[in-house]
Image (cartoon, rainbow, N blue to C red):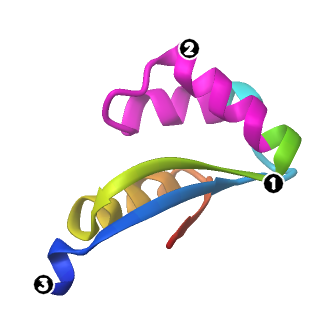
Amino acid sequence: MAKRNKKVRLFLHDDSVNSMDHVIETLSGIIPGCNVIKANSIALIVHNSGKCQIYHGFMKEAIYLYAQLVRNGLTVSVQ
């Protein structure tokens, strides 16, 4: 399988910089299928447990989403 067809996961990590509102607005505007309600749930999970999976899919799309999220100041990792 070519590397770009590899499936990966994106995780959002807790930080002390971004407000809950900023995280919710950013996630709902960038992650496919993520509305404000789902983004709010993710933000609460990240706040309480330190991280949460926010995307599972192909490497090419994950890298694109990763770049947008980082550009908006969020702390994200690809695994």
Q: Which residue is mark 2?
A: 37
Question: Which residue is at a point 66% across and 24% down the rendered structure image?
Answer: 41
Look at the picture and state if 48 lies above or below 41: below
Question: Which residue is at a point 16% across and 73% down the rendered structure image?
Answer: 5
Mark 1 nearby-residue class (10 Å; few <14, some 14–19, many ≥20): some
Residue 19 appearing in the image: no
How far from the left and from the top, in percent, is residue 16? 87, 51
Residue 5 part of the magenta-drawn span: no
Tell me where residue 25 sits by quadrant: top right
Question: Which residue is at a point 52% across and 35% down the rendered structure image?
Answer: 26
How far from the left and from the top, in percent, is residue 35? 44, 19
Look at the picture and state if 61 lies above or below 30: below
Specify start and end residues of the magenta stretch as a single range.
Answer: 23-46
Which element is circle 1 on?
Answer: loop
The three-letter amino acid code for the residue at tag 2 is: Ile
Q: CA distance from mark 3 to mark 1?
A: 35 Å
Determine whether, in the image, residue 28 is placed left or right of residue 45.
left
Residue 25 appearing in the image: yes
Look at the picture and state if 14 lies above or below 28: below
Taking depth in this image into account, of 76 and 57 the one nearest to the observer is 57
Taking depth in this image into account, of 13 and 53 the one nearest to the observer is 53
Please tell me whether mark 3 or mark 2 is closer to you in this view.
3
The three-letter amino acid code for the residue at tag 3 is: Met
Taking depth in this image into account, of 37 and 19 the one nearest to the observer is 37
Which element is circle 2 on?
Answer: helix
Among numbered discs 3 and 2, the one appearing first in the sequence? 3
How far from the left and from the top, in percent, is residue 31? 39, 39
Which circle marks residue 15 in the picture? 1
Q: Which residue is mark 3?
A: 1
Among numbered discs 3 and 1, the one appearing first in the sequence? 3
